[in-house]
Image: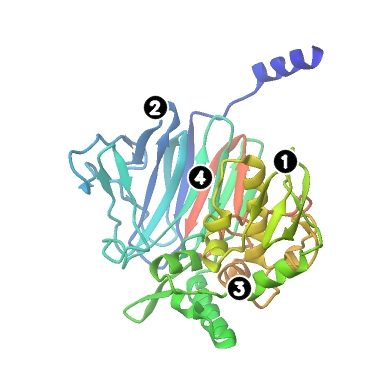
Amino acid sequence: MAGAQDNVAHQRVAVATSSTLQIALQNQTSSNTVYAYITGLDIDNNNALFLLQADGKTPYYPASPSSTLSPLGVNCAIPLGAPGNTVTATIPHLAGARLWFSRDSPLTFFLNPGPGLVEPSAANKSDPNYNKYWDFCEFTFNSNQLFANISYVDFVCLPISLTLNNTSGGTQHVSGLPSNGLDAVCSGLVAQRAQDGVGWDQLIVTLNGANLRAISPNLGIAMNSSLFSGYYQPYVNAIWSQYTGNSLQVDTQASFGTVSGTVNNGQLTFQGVGSYSQPSSADIFSCSTGPFSPTGNIEKDAITARLAAACNRSTLLLNVVHPDGESVSNYYKYAITNHYSRICHSINLDGKGYAFPYDDVSPSSSIDQSGSISDPNPQLLTVAVGGANAHA
C-alpha cells in the first residue's frame, strides 16, 4: 500500500506542460516567399479543429460548412519573410498536429462538413497544391510532453530541421536534409535504377524540368499499382526458407516479451498469437496491408511492426532476434531493400528521419533513427525550413 500512496503523491506534484508553446519558424530557403501553417486538434477545446491565423497568435476554429471543399474563412498563411528571418508562433495543446511550409506560393486548404480539414495532397494530380513546393513535420503537444518528428513517409520536398529547448536548458536537435537534399535524394534514386533496373526513378516528380518532390514507394504504388510488383518476392522467399524449421524470435518490447515463430504450411506462425502469409512488396512498403494489416490485437500488432521494419531494412536474414539483434550499420545492406528509405537516411545530416511507417522500431539498446524529439518540459521549438544552415 505504501507504493500506491507514493504513486498518488507523485501524481499530485507532477508538473504539467505550460498551456501554450512558442514555435520559432525560420526561413532557411533562398526564397523571399515562404509560408507556414499550423493545424491540429485543440485538446483543451474538446478536440476542436484548429488552425493558426496568419498573425501566428490567433486561433481559428472553423465552423462546419454546408458543402464539401469550402474555403477557409480566414487567412492562415503565416509569412516568414526574407531568408534568415524568424517568426514566432504560439500554440495551445494540440493533438495530431502538423506544421506545413510552402515555398514561392501559398497552400490551399479546404473544409468539409464536420468540420473536416482537406489537406494538401502529393498523390492527387488535380489538387491545387500538387505542383507546389511544400512539406510538413508532425507534432503533438499535450499536458505530458511535446513530441515532434520530421517525416518522409509520404515524400521528400523541402528540408526541415527541429531544435527543442527545454526549461532546464537542455537541447535536442534533428538535422534534416541539407539545402540540396531533394536533388541528392533524386540523384540517388536514379543511380539505384541504373544499378538494379527497378523503377526507383519513377518516384521522382518534376516541375518545369526541376525536381519537385520524391515520393515514397508506398505513395508511388498508390499512384501506379504495378510499380515494384514482385520486387520483394525473392527476399520473402528467402525468409520463408530460412525460418522453415528454424525459429524467428521477435522482441515485442512490451509486456509480451520475446516470442518465437516458425514457417509451417506456408505460414509464419507465432503460436497462440497468429500467423502471417507472405507479404507482397506493397504490403511491406505500406506496413499496413495484407498480412501486415492492423488487427487490434496488441501483441500481434507489435510483432507486425517489427517484421515490417525488418523487411523494409532487409535484416531478417542476418540474425534470429529482432529488433534487438540488429545493428543500424547493417540496415539496407541486402540488394533487395527499401532503397528510398536508405537514400533518405544517408543524405540526412544526422541519418535520422521517418522514411516508412515503422521507422521508429529500433533495438532497445540503440539510438532511435526516426528523427523524433520529445520532452515533458518544452520551452521553445525551433523549426527551420530550407536547409541553408542545417547541421548535424
In the image, 169 versus 231, the foreground residue is 231
- Give the CA separation, mark 1 to mark 2: 33 Å
Residue tagged 2: 45
- Give the CA separation, mark 3 to mark 2: 49 Å
Specify the amino acid type for callout 2: Asn
Secondary structure under tag 2 reads: helix
Q: How many discs appear? A: 4
- Dot placed on the residue nearer the N-terminal end, 1 or 2: 2
Secondary structure under tag 4 reads: strand
Q: Nearer the viewer, mark 3 or mark 1?
A: 3
- Give the CA separation, mark 4 to mark 1: 24 Å
Residue 157 visible in the picture:
no
Question: Residue 349 vs residue 150: left or right?
Answer: right
- Dot placed on the residue nearer the N-terminal end, 4 or 2: 2
Residue at 39% of width from left, 68% of height from top? 223
In the image, 385 versus 257, the foreground residue is 257
Q: Nearer the viewer, mark 4 or mark 3?
A: 3
In the image, 338 versus 14, the foreground residue is 338
Q: Are marks 3 and 1 in contact (CB under 8 Å)?
A: no
